[in-house]
Image: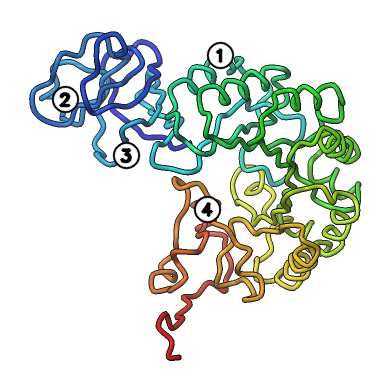
Amino acid sequence: MKTIQSEPINITENIFGKITFSPKKKKIRSQYIYCFKDGILPSISGYAGIISYQNREQLQIGNCIIKDRDSLHEGDVVLIEKNGSISKLYDSTSSHNAIFATEKCNHRCIMCPQPPIEKEENKTQFNLKLIQLLDRKITNIGITGGEPTLIGDDLFLLINKIKTNLPEASITILSNGVQFANKEYALKLALCNCKNLQIDIPIFSDISSIHNHIVGAKTFYKTVQGLYNLALFKQRIGIRIVIHKLTYKRLPQLSAFIYHNFPFVTQVAFMQMETTGMAKENLTSLWIDPYDYNKQLEEAVLYLSDRKMNPCIYNAQLCILPPSIRSFAQQTISDWKDIYLPECTDCTLKAKCGGFFESNKEHHSQHIKSIRENTNPKI
């Protein structure tokens, strides 16, 4: 989530609410944080908090001051902490929003961009309130972590709340699939009867010992059983594969393994690695220039495509992909951490390209270049 720093004024406890730039009726003000830019400050009684864009000397009353006028939008949902840190929990202008169910995880993946924590307060009641504040017309929302299934049956509370409050939203759950090895738990998910839900689960190798080494747990066959249980209850499933030095060589074999063992999956995503968190700590043993695994990636993607397995490529730059698989690349990096390099400025494919994780500014392919395609070719 994006974090904005502000100057706190008399904040004694965390403030949570929905951003608005227009005055609200008193009976609903407690849900809103009023953003005041210029002019005379209207009646502010009843709001969860006030954000001002003015200097402290001009501000007579309020909770915090921020300088960046473009960092907040009508409908954003934020958490303001006592130190003035503003966490954007929902960005009304973004198509990449997610509910963080927990920061705990039962895996220790060596390339995890967000290392798990061992102890935390239960986030479920907070997340139920968050869902209630979101725009009812949003079309997609993620549930992520950590490992979302570690909150147990509370996961189904979140799903049902989204179904009720966000009827047009498709839901993507990012899970390692281990908990779904319990058939009763997989059945509880199915009983939510959420037709717009997909569970995305990683498989990093067709060899169990390699997968287990990457995730830091001996859970390969539990994940496999979880996939079968979800398929048994007719749930929509995607498979995700993060590519790095330990996974790239067997991408073709892994694709064949997926085709022969999980023909029911709706999507197989090959993902370029984000070099932050655990990935940054283990960079020496993980990093490979994405250009250098093009042969294996191309073979794997085309193999699955020929068999109608709906492969796609996440987080990749079009200029380094072979032309034969560029059409499989999708723009998937969250808006707030998506960047482009100076080399991208004049590229005619920039608007279609996934760009880079901000954390990959120092660690990216050495083959980045602008593509100058003739957009008006002569017939």
> Foreground mark, 1 or 4?
1
Mark 3: amino acid: Ser
Q: Of the numbered discs in the image, which one, if any, rests on residue 71?
A: 3
In this image, 110 relative to 101: left or right? right
* Quarter of the figure with the C terminus: bottom left
Q: Which residue is mark 4?
A: 357
Identify the secondary structure beneath mark 1.
helix
Marks 1 and 2, how far apart in space?
A: 35 Å
Of labels 1 and 2, earlier in sequence is 2
Of labels 4 and 2, earlier in sequence is 2
Q: Residues within 10 Å of mark 1 (few under 14, many from 20)?
A: few
Q: Which residue is mark 1?
A: 125
Residue 219 vertical placement versus 344 (above, below): above
Residue 217 vertical placement versus 321 (above, below): above
The picture places residue 274, in percent across and down from the top left corner, at: 60, 51
Q: Residues within 10 Å of mark 4 (few under 14, many from 20)?
A: many
Q: Which residue is mark 2?
A: 56
The picture places residue 285, in percent across and down from the top left corner, at: 74, 55
